Structure formats: structure tokens, C-alpha cells
Amino acid sequence: MASQVDVRESSESIWKKGQASNSSVVEEDDDTAAGPSSSSSSSTAADKRAERIKKLRDLQLRRNEARKLNHQEVAEEDKRKKLPANHEAMQRRVEWENKEEEARKEAESRGEDYDRVKMLEMTAEDADKFERKRKKKNPDQGFSGFAAAQYRQYQRLTKQMKPSDDYKREKEEKGEAMMYPNVDDVNYGGQGKVPEAAVDRMVADLEKQIEKREKYSRRRAHQDEADIDYINERNMKFNRKLARFYDPFTSEIKQNLERGTAI
């Protein structure tokens, strides 16, 4: 019996030692497993912190850049507001004039006429567009009354007059006082006889005006946007004559007929 008890005690002691050794091995395994995981977690946190700091710095740089650009834009806008309203058109005009001047100098250096070269390079479509724009901008409206017609004729006739050597010579001989007297002068109206050559020149000019007036028939420019209410040119002229006299009274009737609301 005593031997059996000793064997049991020895076996229990061996089992306890085995359990203790197993627990120590497990603890060592746990310690070895816990070591790398803690170090890796700390390194991951540091990387995240560094990445966040980098992003924050990038955002600060972008904010500073945006602030700088906004300040520049505000300064440019204030500068544009202080400029005249037609500054851009004036700038484009100056650039176009500079280009024209450079092209003209190049043509002159080659011994060419710039206006002729420019017209040769212009297409028919551009020429037609330029002509329509010119007519629309400054159309020839003729004259609005008798006084305007007389003034227009006077301007045209004075442009045709040439300087007279006889007038200059007489002005030098008699002086300003004799050439332009007033009503208080004794010799007022007695400047002498008009030369026959001057009278003949005036008569010839008047006869020329009469002959030109008889042959003249100004052809009006065709308006593309005008209503077509004629079948030929003769009918068009007749309708214009009627319109001059009756349009103030028949314009409303004509509009009602076109709208279909006439009674």
C-alpha cells in the first residue's frame, strides 16, 4: 500500500511539473506573439500621423496659393473697373493698326502697293460684307429739304473751284481794306467791272449744271429688307410716288390687311 501511494504521489508531481512547463511555454509563446504585434501597431500609428501632417501641410499650401490668386484677381478687377468703357475696343484697334503698319512697311520694302496687295488678298465674300457694312453705317440719305440740297450743292461746287492768281494779285495790290469793305466805306460797291472771262466762266458752269440736272436720275440703293410690293421697276417707282402722298393716311389700313383684321 505504501508503495502504491508513493507511485501516485510521484505521478501527480510529474503531472504538475508538466502542466507548469506547458503554462510557461504558453506564456513565452504569448509574449513572443505580443511583441511583434505591438511594434507593428505603433509603426502604423506613426505612419498615419505623418501622412495626416503631410496632408495638412498640402492643404495649407493650397490655401495660401488660393488666397494669393484671389488677391491678384481682385486687384486686376479693380484695375479693369478704373479703365474706360471702350478700353478693350481701343486696345484691339491699336493692335490692328500696329499690324496694318507693319504689313504696310513690309510691302513698301518689297516695292509693292499695300492697298493693292490687301485688295488682292480679300475674298469676294469679305468685300461684299465690308461694302454692306459701309452702306449700313453711313448710307446716302440724299437731302431732307431745299436748304440742305442747296448747301450740299454749294459744297460740291466750291470743291471744284481752283485758286485764282488774279484774285491773289489784286488782293496784294489793294490790300485787305479795299478787298473787304464795309458799308461805311466811300467806295462801297464800286470795286470795278467784272472781267468778261469770269462772266463767261460762270455762264458755262451754269449751263453745265442745267445739262447735268436734265440728264441726272439718281438710282436709289436697293434695300433687301424692304417689302416687295411691285412687279417691275416702273411699278416700283409708281408705288413710291403713291407712298409719298398717301402713306400717312393708308398705313393703318395696309397693316390691317396684312394682319387679316381689316373690316
Image (cartoon, rainbow, N blue to C red):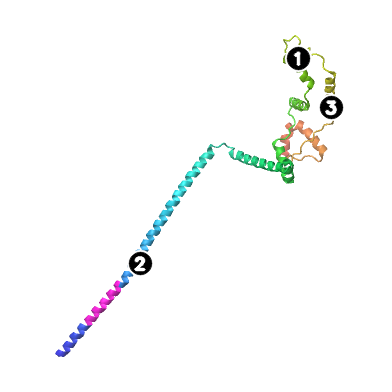
Q: For marks 1 and 3, give the CA distance.
A: 33 Å
Instruction: Please indicate whether residue 198 sits to the left or right of residue 100 in the image.
Output: right
Name the spot of residue 97 as percent of width and height, x first: 65, 40
Comparing 140 with 39, the one in front is 39
User: Which of the two discs, 2 and 3, labels the residue nearer the N terminus?
Assistant: 2
User: Which of the two discs, 1 and 3, labels the residue nearer the N terminus?
Assistant: 1
Tally of marks = 3
Instruction: Identify the residue at horizontal 47%, vertical 48% (top origin).
Output: 66
Amino acid type at mark 3: Lys
- Dividing the picture into quarters, in which one does residue 89 lie? top right
**Of discs 1 and 3, which sits in the foreground?**
1
Q: Is residue 113 magenta?
A: no
Q: For marks 1 and 2, give the CA distance.
A: 121 Å
Label 2, on which residue?
Answer: 40
Span colored in magenta: 15-31
Q: For marks 2 and 3, give the CA distance.
A: 115 Å
Amino acid type at mark 2: Ser
Instruction: Identify the residue at horizontal 16%, vertical 90% (top origin).
Output: 3
